[in-house]
């Protein structure tokens, strides 16, 4: 009976017209087009490139016919005598260090969260404010600080402070490899667990625990049987997400692992691509994407479902904090030590290095400001001037700031539109497609994302221009990579305002554009602002995403740090790191003034 | 001349039929209430009339103007339909003051700001909100927000008011006040009003016409009093009235034909008793549901015709009236008593079923059986 209405050419036509009359459909379609271009096509191109002979491949094989199909690289990675060194060992290193990092980070972060949220530890507010800092500063800065302290002269290059002070060269396992990688990254990542678990602890409706108490359960029993199971999903989630992030990290294993030939997937991708064995690099990037996707998918599917019961809003009373009793000061000392190691030491070590005239002489008498404000002097660092009067570094600073601003503004706005399209079209296939595709960059680790863009934009292909070497390309990759965050911020703020507010404007006679400008935008811009500042900070400290794409013209502060460190000018790399820390931490403080921190 | 004409309106979401072939017309100054449980499609109908939802098929005509027709491919967007709409959530813009909220529609029409000010102030005064102009919605009480939403609709002087459960977020006392206020508003402005609610009391007290919806279809439409007295289906009988109508299943038995020219009365055989009705001859053995409103059952002191003994189960006094719940074999019946009653729980009392108040529904079709 109803089918009778559906058939008929005229009605189908008007149906399509009515469909396209909804502005959110148009926006969804445009977004879909953009997203396919910046997310899906690069992926397809990268996979396609891996089965095509490249020009540079003629060095590797006589059979290379540039442009024609081949499985040479897949065989090289998966089934050759190189497999062990190129794939398996780096894969093992990646997995094992990530496992160590996430286990340690989870342990430290969750204990800290409990102590800060639920006990009477003195100075909890200060601890809470400081605990996020290690996560805000770029991860490789912890690695640089570590090297400034524990570098030894056996690997080559200047020795660190430890050797200077004690006259003993630290053993290799302390200076490089597994131990420092796990240690520095656990120090970097524990705030992530801390944030997730403390949010989850705060969200527990205290009545749940109180009813346990009324039934006569002891504090420790409640902790074990009620509190712990409720935060378990957050705990597992933080473990899994830390694991997947650690897998994609590039700077730290490069600085701390490569010198002793501990390679990871990320450093292998980098070295393959910089050695112009790009196809192999692409395949490794593909492997990395695959692993990371599976992990995140697992997290969404298995834990995502259980997570729901933790978010029951906590009304009720705050439970009275657990008294730590005699252990109070012991725990306080431990927390202070943690903060000194994770927050204070990196600053001190980085700064100290910048004041050392010679990279291995840390004498307080030899301190200098040369690497900050010195004029060019051929005696030091091949005549590079101090960073505050060095035009190359000033340009890199400008590049960094410009990049972060552009990425933050553009992805912030796209995020608002994603939120609008997704929420307006809730539960339609189109809306789901927009939501899911905008989430895809989250699955791709930074360096692999860089590899995707490298493969697509090196040469002009049809309508796609050759953007390699341009600022636009780097901006584009930063925008695309951050869409999952801004999109999510857009969706959540759009969900809060509800569609009736916009409909009320429509009924009042306002055109769509007016309703959007006067109602939707003013109400979502605040939520988008938090996404904006977050993206700004993320891009300011971004290294792995852009390391494959920058050219001397488009250098940023982070990639400058990387180059100087590579060349052994540790004072410069430290000085620039200090600059990055200052910018990023002030951004974070600014963000705290304006908005509630979002966990990403 | 009907002001609103809805013809064969159907709306399908995915594979759910939300509104199914609905047609009705509304005359000028009518106050129509669309009544039904949640999910019956009443809000969807309202949104389609407003232009916020595109129907799957059908036609809508507002004041002689075709605003939607699937056949002719006509769709006039909400902003050009010039109807007023009050949302369930009020949908007041939280970043605008009361003045800005109310003035928005006029500014959109590019009215001079001096005139906007004058009109907004007029409307605010009319709704006793003149001191609130500078406030933000979240700084006001629910009742005040409700009046701002009304003001925002009124200021544009639409000829048709659409209201989507406007009182459902208010507490009981305020709801009563606002009911009177809206009814008065309708009286003063004379605007044709379509009002959506799931609260049957609102339906009975405010409208001059109600339309009861179930699963996307209109079950019955008519004057509230008539719909209450003669519900055309069991669903309507059940949905309207509080406490709920009493229902007893049975089959049609012998028709008694009293001497002296009195009309014949069909009897209904229930499990443990037989009741006489005011219906004439009915096919014997037909399965029926006998229904009687709680206020029509009477407590009597002695057994008699159509009178059954029952046991008092619960007593629910509510000021001027009392609801008695009695056990009649394995059934519970509600009796609404307006006078003082001295019953105690456990008492055996006699209940009289006046035949003229007994409604019979066909068990198979759920429809009211026509009285002769």
Image (cartoon, coloured by chain):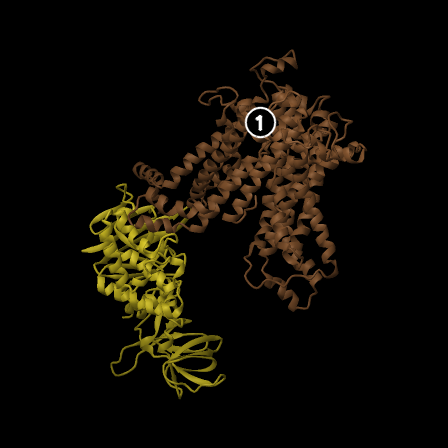
**Quarter of the C terminus of chain A within the rendering:** top right
Q: Position of residue B97 (x, y in %)?
A: 35, 55
**Residue at the farthest top position:** A62
**Residue at the farthest right position:** A168
**Residue at the farthest front position:** A365
Image position of A321 (left or right of A425): right
Chain letter, colour yellow: B
Chain letter, colour brown: A
Q: Which residue is mark 1?
A: A451
Image position of B23 (left or right of A214): left
Image position of A146 (left or right of B213): right
Residue A592 against residue B36 in the figure, above or below? above
Q: Residues within 10 Å of mark 1 (few under 14, many from 20)?
A: many
Q: Nearer the viewer, residue A473 or A341?
A: A341
Q: Where, by quadrant of the figure, is residue A297 drawn?
A: top right
Mark 1: secondary structure: helix
Q: Nearer the viewer, residue B21 or A441?
A: A441
Q: Nearer the viewer, residue B289 or A348?
A: A348
Residue A588 against residue A259 in the figure, above or below? below
How many numbered discs sit on the rendered protein? 1
């Amino acid at each position: 009976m109803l089918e009778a209405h559906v058939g008929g050419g005229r009605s189908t036509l008007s149906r399509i017209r009515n469909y396209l009359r909804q502005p959110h459909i148009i926006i969804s379609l445009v977004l879909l087009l953009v997203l396919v271009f910046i997310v899906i096509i690069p992926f397809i191109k990268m996979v396609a490139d891996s089965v095509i002979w490249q020009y540079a491949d003629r060095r590797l094989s006589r059979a290379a016919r540039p442009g024609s199909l081949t499985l040479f690289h897949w065989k090289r990675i998966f089934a050759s005598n190189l497999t062990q060194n190129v794939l398996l060992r780096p894969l093992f290193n990646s997995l094992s260090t990530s496992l160590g990092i996430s286990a340690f980070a989870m342990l430290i972060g969750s204990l800290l969260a409990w102590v800060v949220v639920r006990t009477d530890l003195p100075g909890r507010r200060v601890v809470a404010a400081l605990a996020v800092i290690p996560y805000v500063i770029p991860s490789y800065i912890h690695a640089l600080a570590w090297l400034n302290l524990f570098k030894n002269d056996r690997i080559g290059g200047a020795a660190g402070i430890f050797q200077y002070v004690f006259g003993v060269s630290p053993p290799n396992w302390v200076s490089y490899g597994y131990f420092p990688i796990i240690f520095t990254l656990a120090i970097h990542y524990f705030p992530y667990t801390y944030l997730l678990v403390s949010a989850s602890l705060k969200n527990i409706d205290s009545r749940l625990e109180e009813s346990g108490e009324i039934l006569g359960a002891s504090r420790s029993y409640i902790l074990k049987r009620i509190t712990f199971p409720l935060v378990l999903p957050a705990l597992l989630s933080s473990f899994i997400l830390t694991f997947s992030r650690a897998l994609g990290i590039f700077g730290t294993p490069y600085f701390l692992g490569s010198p002793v030939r501990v390679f990871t997937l990320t450093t292998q991708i980098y070295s393959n691509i910089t050695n112009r064995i790009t196809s192999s690099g692409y395949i490794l990037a593909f492997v990395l994407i695959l692993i990371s996707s599976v992990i995140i998918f697992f997290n969404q599917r298995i834990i995502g479902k259980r997570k729901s019961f933790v978010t029951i809003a906590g009304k009720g009373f705050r439970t009275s904090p657990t008294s730590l009793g005699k252990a109070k000061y012991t725990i306080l000392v431990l927390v202070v030590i943690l903060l000194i190691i994770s927050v204070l030491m990196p600053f001190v070590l980085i700064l100290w290095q910048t004041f050392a005239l010679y990279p291995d002489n840390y004498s307080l008498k030899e301190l200098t400001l040369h690497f900050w404000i010195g004029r060019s002097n051929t005696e030091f660092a091949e005549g590079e001037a101090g960073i505050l009067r060095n035009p190359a570094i000033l340009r890199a600073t400008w590049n960094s700031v410009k990049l972060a601003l552009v990425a933050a503004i553009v992805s912030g706005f796209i995020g608002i539109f994603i939120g609008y399209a997704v929420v307006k079209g809730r539960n339609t296939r189109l809306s789901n497609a927009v939501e899911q595709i905008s989430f895809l960059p989250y699955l791709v680790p930074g360096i692999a994302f860089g590899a995707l863009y490298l493969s697509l934009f090196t040469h002009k292909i049809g309508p796609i221009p050759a953007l390699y070497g341009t600022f636009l390309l780097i901006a584009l990759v930063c925008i695309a990579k951050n869409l999952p965050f801004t999109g999510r911020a857009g969706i959540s703020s759009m969900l809060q305002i509800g569609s009736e507010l916009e409909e009320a404007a429509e009924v009042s006679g306002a055109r769509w554009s007016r309703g959007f400008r006067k109602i939707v935008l003013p109400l979502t811009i605040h939520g988008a602002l938090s996404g904006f500042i977050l993206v700004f900070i993320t891009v300011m400290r971004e290294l792995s995403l852009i390391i494959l794409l920058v050219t001397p013209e488009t250098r940023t502060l982070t990639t400058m740090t990387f180059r100087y460190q590579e060349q052994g000018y540790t004072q410069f790399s430290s000085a620039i790191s200090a600059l990055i820390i200052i910018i990023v931490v002030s951004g974070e403080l600014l963000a705290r003034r304006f908005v509630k921190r979002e966990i990403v | 001349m009907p002001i609103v004409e809805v013809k064969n309106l159907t709306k399908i979401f995915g594979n759910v039929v939300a509104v199914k072939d609905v047609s009705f017309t509304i005359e000028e100054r009518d106050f129509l209430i669309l009544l039904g449980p949640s999910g019956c499609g009443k809000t969807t109908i309202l949104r389609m009339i407003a232009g916020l939802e595109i129907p799957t098929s059908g036609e809508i005509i507002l004041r002689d103007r075709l605003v939607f027709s699937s056949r002719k491919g006509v769709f006039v967007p909400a902003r050009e339909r010039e109807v007023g709409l009050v949302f369930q959530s009020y949908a007041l813009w939280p970043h605008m003051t009361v003045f800005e909220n109310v003035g928005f529609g006029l500014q959109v029409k590019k009215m001079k700001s001096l005139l906007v000010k004058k009109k907004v102030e007029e409307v605010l005064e009319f709704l006793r909100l003149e001191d609130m102009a500078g406030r933000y919605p979240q700084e006001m009480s629910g009742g005040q927000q409700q009046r701002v939403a009304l003001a925002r609709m009124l200021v544009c002087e639409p000829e048709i008011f659409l209201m989507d459960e406007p009182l459902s977020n208010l507490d009981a006392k305020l709801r009563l006040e606002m009911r009177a206020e809206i009814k008065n508003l309708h009286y003063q402005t004379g605007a044709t009003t379509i009002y959506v609610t799931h609260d049957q009391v609102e339906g009975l007290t405010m409208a001059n016409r109600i339309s009861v919806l179930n699963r996307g279809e209109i079950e019955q439409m008519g004057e509230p009093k008539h719909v209450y007295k003669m519900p055309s289906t069991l669903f309507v009988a059940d949905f309207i009235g509080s406490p709920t109508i009493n229902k007893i299943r049975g089959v049609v038995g012998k028709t008694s034909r009293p001497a002296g020219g009195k009309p014949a009365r069909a009897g209904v055989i229930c499990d443990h008793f037989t009741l006489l009705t005011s219906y004439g001859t009915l096919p014997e053995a037909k399965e029926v549901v006998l229904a009687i409103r709680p206020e029509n059952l009477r407590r009597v002191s002695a057994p008699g015709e159509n009178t059954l003994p029952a046991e008092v189960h619960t007593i629910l006094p509510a000021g001027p009236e009392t609801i008695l719940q009695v056990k009649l074999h394995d059934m519970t019946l509600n009796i609404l008593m307006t006078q003082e009653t001295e019953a105690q729980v456990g008492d055996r009392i006699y209940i009289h079923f006046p035949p003229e108040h007994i409604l019979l529904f066909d068990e198979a079709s759920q429809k009211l059986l026509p009285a002769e």
